Amino acid sequence: MLRSLGLQLRKPSGFFGKIVSAMLIKWNRNRYEVLINDLKIQPNDKLFEIGYGPGLGINLISKEYESCQVYGIDFSELMYLRATKRNKQFVNSNRVNLMFGDFLETEIDARNFDKVFCLNVVYFWDNLQKPFEKANSLLKNDGLFYIYMDSKEDLSKVTFAEDDIFNKYTIEQIQDALKLAGFKEVGYYFDNGYFVKAKK
């Protein structure tokens, strides 16, 4: 059962995926609020979320910043459908563009975004270099890549976060991979999890 929860958190699907979707809304609201404040969003910014889940973060941004465009991708079909429904008014007005697919395999316009962000996604990347390099390629010069992740120590205490599902990275591993991917300024702070900023 706990292993099934870990797999559902990675890629929600079916009936249990709907339950996980509701859990994600509850668990992640506060983290999204902190993340959005830290992004320092400016008028007419273009943003991209990797792994948007049920679409809460995109919804919060779209409600508060009317001149911004928000794009995103998720490889769970259920999350794509849920996020599209949650953001229907913004999708219909072309302020939100949601993609269904694998971030690494989907062609996305380069040097097109002011901010790229992801929340609780890095655990599911076996190799940090490729996704970090792709995130860098999407950003305009001086653009910002923002990551939220739980600590390796906290994840190690969670029974459903099995090693073959969750990659438990240290903050040092994240910093090193970001620098290797070409980010010139990398910083972070800890508040019940790591909030990491990397500037192109």
Image (cartoon, rainbow, N blue to C red):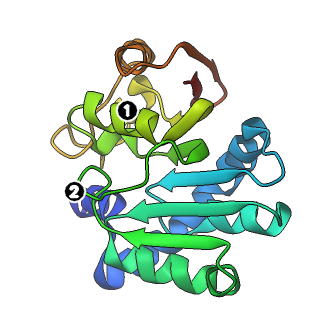
Label 2: which secondary element = helix
- Labels 2 & 1 near each other (Cβ < 8 A): no
Amino acid marked by disc 2 = Arg
Residue 79 seen in the figure: yes
From the top left corner, tell me how far across and down residue 25 is, in percent: 59, 66
Q: Check disc 1: other Cα within 10 Å, few if <14, some if 14-19, many if 20+.
A: many
* Residue topped by disc 1: 132
Cα distance in 3D space between marks 2 and 1: 27 Å
* Residue topped by disc 2: 3
- What residue is shown at x 44% (from left), y 46% (from top)? 110
Mark 2 vs mark 1: give the one in front: 1
Label 1: which secondary element = helix
Q: Identify the mark at residue 61; answer none if there is no mark.
A: none
Query: Which mark sits nearer the N-terminus, 2 or 1?
Result: 2
Say which quadrant the N terminus sits in.
bottom left
Foreground residue among 5 and 149: 149
Placement of 120 over or under 92, stated as above or below: above
From the top left corner, tell me how far across and down residue 63 is, in percent: 80, 69
**In the figure, is residue 146 to the left or right of 16?**
right
Placement of 88 over or under 166, stated as above or below: below
- What residue is shown at x 41% (from left), y 24% (from top)? 153
From the top left corner, tell me how far across and down residue 183 is, in percent: 48, 19
- What residue is shown at x 53% (from left), y 13% (from top)? 184
- What residue is shown at x 68% (from left), y 63% (from top)? 69
Q: How many marks?
A: 2
